[in-house]
Amino acid sequence: MTEYTLDAAVIGGGAAGMSAAKALVDAGCTTALVEREQTLGGILLQCIHNGFGVHEFKEELTGPEYAERWEDMVTPLAGPRGATIFTDTTVMELIPGSDEGGFTLVCVSPGSGFFHIRTRAVVLTAGCRERNRGNIRIPGTRPAGVYTAGLAQRMVNMEGCLPGKDAVIVGSGDIGLIMARRLVWSGCRVHGVVEIQPYPSGLTRNIVQCLNDFSIPLYLSHVVSRIHGRTRLEAVDITPLEEGRPDTAKTFTQACDNLLLSVGLIPSAELAREAGAQLNPLTGGPLVDCRLMSTVPGLFAAGNGLHVHDLVDYVSAEARRAGENAAAYLSGYQPARQIRLKPGSNIRYLVPGTLDPARPQPILFRPMIVKNGAILTLSLDGKIIKEQKKNHIQPSEMMQVDPAKLDLGNLELRPDSVLEVSLS
Amino acid sequence: MNSQQNSNQNNKQGNNNPDSRNPAATATENPEQTREIICIACPVGCHLQVMFRGGLAKDASPDPDTIAITGNRCPRGEIYGREEVLAPTRMVTTTIPVAGSSFARRVPVRTTGPIPVARIPDLLTQLHAMELHAPLARGQVLLTVEGSENSDNEAIQVVTSHRA
């Protein structure tokens, strides 16, 4: 069996993987970049709308443009001292070695069959998958015509087939909203977007340009309560919620031949879990320390495979840090101490979970509330060290705070210090 | 069938308000109208009330001098509101079938800038009737959007947004 030995491997060649691989090669590490599709780019290739790259490239690009810009930066890194790019290659198993924390990647590709890649560090950038009908337990029959929104996006944009002519969309996440416009522009009718929360979960811009522009109703505090149809989807029941409970007397039926589910994403963390990494139940991704390293030494994670992002620019930046940190790990760097990071009020989780005072890195989090004029507070061991006004916060927009600006050197840090981030 | 009323405001329908401020104007011929618009200049999403006269006839624009905007928290809302009622524009993206590519069945395309909303249906029809052949580079110009010229006579184009 063919075997490759390199310093590091990056699993997944999307936005995160390309960025992590570039950071590793730039730091002098020989790096395998493994991608299961024929081309690099990942999910960006089906996100044909614009709005990507405002932070990374200072202009608004489409998803495929953003992907190709990165591909143009990564492809020239290929070579014996740089990157080895394996496309059309799936990592079947990630086996942590018994000695010195090395790894074996069991790979398979149509061209090469089975082969192994041996490395001392791995960055997992495998992206995420969509929650589906089973996750939200919609009662009814099981006809054809029920799709996740991202799958429908791939069908329409890349394969050129429509999921149907009359759509209902469940969930007002950005993918669902963008698919609403996409379907209308492709000649379909979209009869409504059904959102269980009392507020939309997508960006305002998408509510305006993808729904309001086409007079598509947005049913807030509503659920799809039943699916009808024997072989093909025929209709769905939609029920309003009154104080969180379905008000079944007000249920109405909407005829449709396809139902798109945009009901959240879950990090693809199977390889990490099977390799022994502890997962964070709040994010679905691996638990990581200040280096974005999981509980398995040498196994790092970034991007949607770590926690689900909404801006690709944040994904690229996070993966760059993971690549740099993996390179530092390979050269022997260990943080002298780590401060625990604690999510405070109105914050669901913080990534990463700890802070290295010697190399502070941005902390990413998602607010649990919608508010104009919110206050972001950072407290160290109960003492407020920074307050920042935020114009507008909402759960659909990830936030970040950069502790490099906190002047940690002048603060009294104990070994058991806790830094809490909260919103009010 | 649909017994629920849409909980979201339908921004496309202007309400005709009876004229209260200027009884001299012929309220029936040129009534003051109000459109509710959500500003998208930033994530705050101010709800704007854009009041104007004129623009009742099909394809007619409101009279720019009569536009009055409330509900905005910053000057960008004023600019956005004016543009939305006078000459709304949008970016357009879609995909077009491509023959002869080793990895792609369709190639994504985009307009190089926002185009007038009224031009979108024709443009989509035109694009969806096209067939392309590989190889294609990113940024290859496919066509020029008719009626998209700005004051400097620069027109918006449709370009590929990935190679194929």
Image: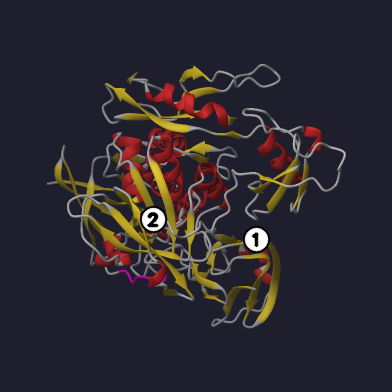
Residue at screen point 38% across, 25% down: B128
Which SS type dominates the magenta stretch? Answer: loop
> Mark 2 belongs to which subunit?
B
Quarter occupied by residue A409? bottom right
* Numbered tag placed on residue A392 in the rendering: 1
Q: Which mark is residue A231?
A: none
Residue B49 rendering spot, x and y as whole percentages: 71, 49
| Residues marked 1 and 2, same chain | no
Seen in the picture, residue A216 relative to A237 is either above or below; the reply is: above
The residue pinned by badge 2 equals B1
Q: Residue A56's image quarter?
A: top right
Report x, y in % for residue A224: 36, 62
Q: Position of residue A401 (x, y in %)?
A: 60, 62
Label total for image: 2
Q: Residues within 10 Å of mark 2 (few under 14, many from 20)?
A: few
- Specify the subunit that label 1 lies on: A
Quadrant where the C terminus of chain A is found in the figure? bottom right
What amino acid type should be assigned to the residue bearing mark 2?
Met
Mark 1 and mark 2: Cα distance apart in space: 38 Å
Q: Amino acid at mark 1?
A: His
Closer to the camera in the image, B112 or A124: B112
Q: Is residue A227 left or right of residue A184?
A: left
| Residue A384 magenta | no
Query: What secondary structure is found at the residue carrying circle 2?
Result: loop
The part of the chain drawn in magenta is A277-282
